[in-house]
Amino acid sequence: MKDIKLNNLKKYLKEQGEAAIAYSGGIDSLFLLKFATMTLGEERVKGYLVKHPLMGKENYKTAFMLLDKYHLPYEVIEIDTLKVPTIKSNSVMRCYHCKKAMMKAILETMKKDGFNKLLVGENKTDTLGEVRPGKKAIEELGILTPLIDLDFYKEDIRKCARKIAISEFDMPSNSCLATRFPYDSQLMLKKLRRVEKVEVILKACGYPIVRAREENDILRLEIRRKDFSKLVKDEEVIYALNQLGYKFITLDLNGYRKGSYDK
């Protein structure tokens, strides 16, 4: 791959002259934040990490670790998304209301810091098929999407991230904990932390791709099909999951797939 897209992104950033960047800890925003810092310098770039209940504790730790590892300028903003009724109710439009609440918090803070332009790491792959109501919030708030505008797909980002020495270029995508529950079910902190614990247990025991879906105290596990036979024989994991208080623990025969509640 040639450096055409990187050069286009460098030109774009220089035209902006500054960049406040919504940072989630994923590879898209990490790449954008690091490249912007390399292009414009630390004094004209800042990442904003919103810490909230729908973000897993492990995700937050990883996001924070990456900021420190690459010496990136940042600020943490804390908001309680569960206090917003339209988010807590987990409607089909939850992502829209959540994204809007987070972006508004960043916009307010960054303006106090002297920034006028907010960029996000959404890319062209995000525009293909998946249900993403959060995109509407980004458009309404006038937030810049350079990776979409410059035709960066997920694979382009991973390749470019590797070129600028981000060793986590192939890190798997993740989503907020609310996606583990069916729409129109009340989100509760205790249950959010429980499904997170399920995924932490499974990943620590050698299941790298997992989604824990919870409905009426029934746990439905989505993992790679090639890991099915290993899991059903894994007494240690089964015992650990049983201690979390679920009435039933099931294995989804369709395997892991993004947005299964959107199907």
Image: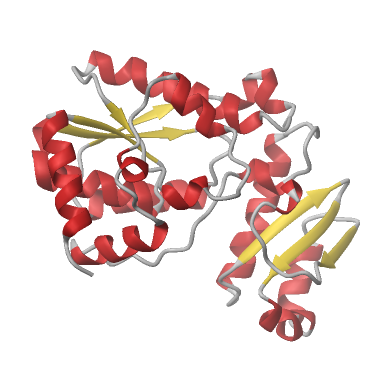
Residue drawn at point x = 49 percent, y = 57 percent: 173
Q: Is residue 18 left or right of residue 49?
A: left
Q: Is residue 244 left or right of residue 189?
A: right
Asked whether the viewer can see residue 79, the reply is no
In the rendered view, how is the structure colored? secondary structure
Q: Where is residue 210 shown, x and y percent of the image?
A: 64, 65
In front: 205, or 114?
A: 114
In front: 77, or 164?
A: 164
Residue drawn at point x = 21 percent, y = 21 percent: 115
- Image vertical order of residue 107 relative to residue 72, above or below: above
Residue drawn at point x = 16 percent, y = 61 percent: 3
Q: Where is residue 248 shown, x and y percent of the image?
A: 90, 60
Asked whether the viewer can see residue 96, the reply is yes
Q: Where is residue 25 shown, x and y percent of the image?
A: 39, 48
Q: Is residue 13 left or right of residue 111?
A: left
- Image vertical order of residue 114 relative to residue 20, above or below: above
In front: 139, or 87?
A: 139
In the rendered image, which quarter is residue 33 located in? top left
Q: Is residue 5 left or right of residue 183?
A: left
Q: Where is residue 221 shown, x and y percent of the image?
A: 75, 64
How many dots with numbers?
0
- Image vertical order of residue 51 relative to residue 250, above or below: above
Residue drawn at point x = 16 percent, y = 29 percent: 16
- Seen from this angle, which residue lies furthest right? 247
In the rendered image, which quarter is residue 141 located in? top left
In front: 15, or 106?
A: 15
Assign the N terminus to one quadrant of the image.
bottom left
